[in-house]
Amino acid sequence: MTYPIDMSVHPDVSAHFDEATNTISCIVKDPASDHCAVVDSVMDIDYAAGRITYDHADRLIAEIEARGLTLDWIIETHVHADHLSAAPYIQERLGGRIGVGEKIMVVQETFGKIFNEGTEFQRDGSQFDALFKDGDTYKVGEMACFAIYTPGHTPACMVHVMGDAAFVGDTLFMPDGGSARADFPGGDAGELYDSIQKVLALPDEMRLFMCHDYGPDGRDIAWETTVAEERAHNIHVGGGKTREEFIRFRTDRDATLAMPKLIIPSLQVNMRAGELPRDADGRPMLKVPVNGL
Ligand SMILES: [Fe+2]
């Protein structure tokens, strides 16, 4: 696949860090117009209390309104397992289309079974406004954007490229953070390695924006690096690490990791494009499948 890369377009990226989930949400503005996209928004949850709030999303909305921007797209790089998406909340207020990778159908099939969803839960991705395949293009204002299919962390992961900026989702972390786990249902360490190679094949100077950062060894939270930096210094894949080395390392490491604290509510909400599931009476209600994950 050859991708329509255009390094001459330099979007303004405004990053919002969510401390509760270590997620970075980005507002990406087309340099040639007042149009923007949001990548990987966050809905706040106090899971112990079953309480949903929207402080993080409200900050994104306030910035978009204050800058007088038109929101074209609300992009999900994948079905996140560690935070809930606020895509429908943002869409209701600002418009825009919600887009995700077309392999969402695989994720919906897998977790539809695990959460014992009824037939009313559609597994065809129809909760989203757009389903992207590898190389699909779209526009934010006049800025040409495209999606790269990057499975491995999950089967539906996509990296989104907007001008000289790529939003890598959970394929890569900052160079000192390495890579995301590949042990969720449908994940695969070998596929993740291959997907990371697609990102590392982008131009050296392309800016890469992370979806997560955990500030390893006490360093300040960071979210921006470049392809050249990752290729040279990423602790899991940089400096020419082989596929076999990566698979061995990733598999051993993943076996030691606990489940993300919010995986159970996150999957139920995110596989519905950010909508809360509802019970037979139409009330928002989350399930816990006992020993199901
Ligand atoms: Fe993730």
Image (cartoon, grey):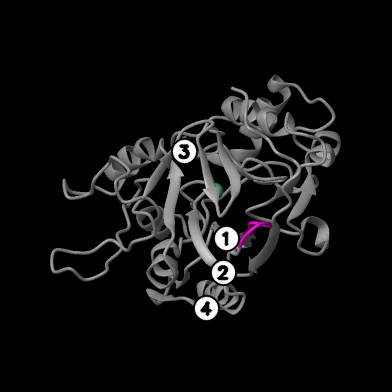
Q: What label does residue 36 carry, if any? A: 1
**Disc 3 marks which residue?**
156
> What residue sits right under mark 2 in the picture?
69
Task: Tell me how far mark 1 sits from mark 2, CA to CA.
Answer: 6 Å
Disc with the residue nearer the chain's start (1 vs 3): 1
Q: Is residue 221 magenta?
A: no
Q: At which x and y percent is residue 144? A: 59, 44
Name the quadrant of the N terminus: top right
> Which type of secondary structure does the marked residue at label 2 adopt?
loop
Label 2 crowding class (10 Å Cα cut-off): few <14, some 14-19, many 20+? Answer: some
Disc 4: which residue: 55
Mark 3 or mark 4, earlier in chain: 4
Q: Say which label, 2 or 4, has the lower sequence index.
A: 4
Badge 3 marks a residue whose secondary structure is loop
- In screen coordinates, is 195 left or right of 61? right
Main SS category, magenta section: loop
Which mark is nearer the camera, 2 or 4?
2
